[in-house]
Amino acid sequence: MKITTPLTDDVIATLHAGDKVEISGVIYVGRDAAHKRIVEALNKGETPPFDPKGQIIYYMGPSPAPPGRPIGSAGPTTSGRMDAYTPRLLEAGLKGMIGKGNRSRAVREAIVKHKAVYFAATGGAAALISQTIKKAETVAYPELGAEAVLRLEVEDFPAIVVNDIYGGDAYDEGKRRYRCESAS
């Protein structure tokens, strides 16, 4: 399924755990240090470096851009490190996150409550994923280096819905589907 940012509640309602999507439009990159600063700004009533309403944050570890490319390898990083900050960002209107790995119960509950979605990007496919990134620019916290907030323009960025607004979890479903029962 092809989807475009910013995400709307109507689009999110069509997504279910396990769905494969291709995302086009603008997504933001942010990791631990940036999340901490963004949440601090929100909690102080300050304006964050981008309006989170309808947006997607990609938990990515970028590498330097080779000549002629907007970015180097662009693989997902472990999402759980952002779990302490995610419910507050969802409350502020964030609608999607891309990363790898499981999310905490609090994040999964916040996804349902705030009608958001968590996508997984394929770890180990950083060079391929980078080919979907058409433009990359730093928009906040450049002093954080690889943890700065980036604004990416993407075209057909591949991802899989892991957690949906219905409480679905593709990781749990996969474990159930392929669990081997021991013979008694």
Image (cartoon, rainbow, N blue to C red):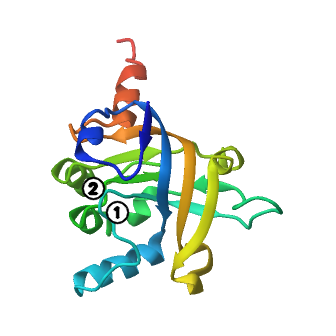
Query: Where the C terminus falls, by quadrant?
Result: top left
Image quadrant where residue 44 sits: bottom left
**Residue placed most toward the observer, 83 or 3:** 3
**Of helix, strand and loop, which one carries label 2?**
helix
Does 134 sit left or right of 11 as displayed? right
**Residue placed most toward the observer, 19 or 82:** 19
Give the residue displayed 40% in from the left and 23% down from the top: 179
Residue 82, x across and y down, in percent: 39, 65
2 and 1 marks in contact (CB < 8 Å): yes
Report which residue position mark 2 lands on.
107
**Residue placed most toward the observer, 137 or 164:** 137
Give the residue displayed 48% in from the left and 56% down from the top: 26
Q: Is residue 67 above or below residue 134?
A: below
Does 95 sit left or right of 73 as displayed? left
What number of labels is visible? 2
Q: Residues within 10 Å of mark 2 (few under 14, many from 20)?
A: many
Labelled disc at residue 83: 1
Give the residue displayed 48% in from the left and 63% down from the top: 28
Residue 140, x across and y down, in percent: 50, 80
Image quadrant where residue 152 sits: bottom right
Labelled disc at residue 20: none
Q: Residues within 10 Å of mark 1 (few under 14, many from 20)?
A: some
**Of helix, strand and loop, which one carries label 1?**
loop
The three-letter amino acid code for the residue at tag 2 is Val
Q: Is residue 168 above or below residue 118?
A: above
Image quadrant where residue 147 sits: bottom right
Residue 148 in view in this figure? no
